[in-house]
Image (cartoon, rainbow, N blue to C red):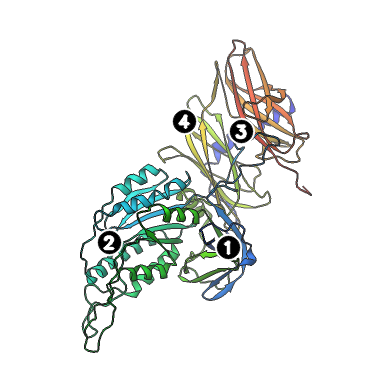
Amino acid sequence: MSTSTRITVVALAVIAGIAAGGRAASPQGPPPAGGPRLAVDFGAVLADGTPVEDLQPGEIEVRLNGRTRKVLALRRVSARQASAGPESPGAAAAVAPLPGPYATNEGAAAGRSFVLLVDELSLVAGRESLLRNSVEGLLPHLTPADRTLVLALPYGGVKAPFTSDPERIRQAMAALIGQGERGETGSGMAERTRTFLETLQAFLQGQAGRRTPLTVILFTAGLAAPRRDAPMALPPGRGELLVDHFKWIGESAGAARANVYLLQPADIKVSAEGWKETIGGRDYLGSDNPLEGIEHLAGVTKGVRLPLDAKGTASLDRVALESSGYYVADLEPESREVLGRSRPMDVRVTRPGATVRARPQITFETGRRSIGRVLEDVLLSGEPAGDLALRAAGFVVRESEDRLRAGVVVEPAGAAVPLAGATAVLFAPTGRIVARWTASDVARRPLLGAMTAPPGTYRLRVAAVDAAGRPGVVDQLLELRLVPVGPLSLGSLMIGVSRPEGVAPQLEFSAEPAAIASFEIYGGEAGLGLSATLELARQAEGPALLTLPLALSRAGEGRVVATATVPLGALAPGDYLLRGIIKLEDGSAGSVTRTLRKTASRPGA
């Protein structure tokens, strides 16, 4: 057995040991350090709604309770997909890029969460087309990572749960019917406004503690302003609407990180009557202007008012544009930081022509959550998490005749970043969790995990948190299947580097002189004639730049390991495809592939 083959077998045995003994382990490591993390998200847009993409920390000022707070870090989160990796030198624009060598949240498009919220009692039947037409301005801009909820309040409830399917959103909007009352009195408008605000508050409270913004698009044909609905000498009337009803919405929106857009029909009929109670107790009922309540709601949420008209899509075109990117500022905590309570927030930018989109209030989580709780919340929430830049890759080996092992390699993008916990799950297409792994020793490098499951297509979701409490999560589609070649089957191609204790799987290369590629071959009888080669190419279907023989070594009953050493020194930075090819004497052939990424060496590395 060659040295390279021996250490490859050691690496595969390590994966087997993790699968057998590491599944039930709990996260270890220090609790999040440095006190509470104060993260403030906000948008910055130009007059036409285009997001500002290059703000610097020196251009922003954040105030909490009127006090300017020091900005420790500023990062931009984009809903647009960034480049997947180094561009191949000389590659033609028409050539399809190679699949990524790993899943990552670095530069990945962050999925947005939209709520299409209809104030159903304000809209009279026959005007629903205004809503449906306007939504067509949003749907073309949605990405597969975006999720949209369709909700009717106060009584209709959820018409479509969070989904990325545009057709399902269309169907939910088509099913909405206005329940508004023609000839509504001022008292009636105030009463239904109070009911609507109470249910809106309950919905927002259910979204409290989110880590990412929630874009709430509220369709309403009018809301009442605060009113007492009775003379001062008498108890309040049925249409009493307090200022606090609006104030509570502002607090709840801050806790839910909700950015509010209010869409109203452009032809709302406004009464010219004002509100002025006389000394004799007359004219006490208040204003019947349906715009005043919309103005109040916009004020407490810093919401943006946009028109609904026959032109249809323009307003939500703008919402889609403005929500396509935002900033997250980490603030320096004070010695006795107030947590769990709403407080005023003001974000300003000095960039000429830029307008801030930020809520006027914010609530920070109370106390410290355990590492396990943070991981569980991030893993199952469905929200993106990019505070910790993370990379992960899955691979497949056989465990038994009817079960396979899904291996996973996890690493923070910064090699020196200490992890406090890491976990991964396999989701079936139905959303059911099929298997789970939790790291028992997060200091290990590389960090390897494994789970067993029947063959199938799964979503591999990996979450990790660093010692400062910052979470990261990545998703990857994983085909848990072996590749058939006549009587044989092939496991995933793995790439790593040689270490004294064995082969260490590695996701990215730079100054390493060589990489070791290997995969397992299952089945077949002793003496079966075959040829085994490894090719390195620049394109998926392109010619081989390098062809190497694969060394075969029996590693157990019905299991052979194929290994080759790939020289990296002369390769230019970029992505390359490794193809492990097996050909049998009867002409049967099959291959397994994986992308190798080489980056430019960093000074001092």
The earlier-in-sequence mark between 4 and 3 is 3
Q: Position of residue 587 (x, y in %)?
A: 59, 12
- Quickly name the residue at label 2: 122
Residue placed most toward the observer, 406 or 536: 536
The earlier-in-sequence mark between 2 and 1 is 2
The earlier-in-sequence mark between 1 and 4 is 1
Three-letter amino acid code of the residue under disc 3: Ala
Helix, strand or loop at disc 2? loop
Q: Nearer the viewer, mark 1 or mark 3?
A: 3
The earlier-in-sequence mark between 1 and 3 is 3
> Which residue occupies 43% across, 50% down?
138
Q: CA distance from mark 1 to mark 3?
A: 39 Å
Q: CA distance from mark 2 to mark 3?
A: 52 Å
Q: CA distance from mark 2 to mark 1?
A: 38 Å
Q: Position of residue 481 (x, y in %)?
A: 51, 28
Three-letter amino acid code of the residue under disc 2: Ser
Q: CA distance from mark 1 to mark 4?
A: 43 Å
- Quickly name the residue at label 1: 329
Helix, strand or loop at disc 1? strand
The earlier-in-sequence mark between 2 and 3 is 3
Helix, strand or loop at disc 4? loop
Q: Position of residue 284 (x, y in %)?
A: 24, 81
Q: Residues within 10 Å of mark 1 (few under 14, many from 20)?
A: many
Furthest residue toward bottom: 279
Q: CA distance from mark 4 to mark 3?
A: 38 Å
> Which residue occupies 47% across, 29% down?
455
- Quickly name the residue at label 3: 94
Three-letter amino acid code of the residue under disc 1: Ala
Furthest residue toward top: 586
Three-letter amino acid code of the residue under disc 4: Pro
- Quickly name the residue at label 4: 454
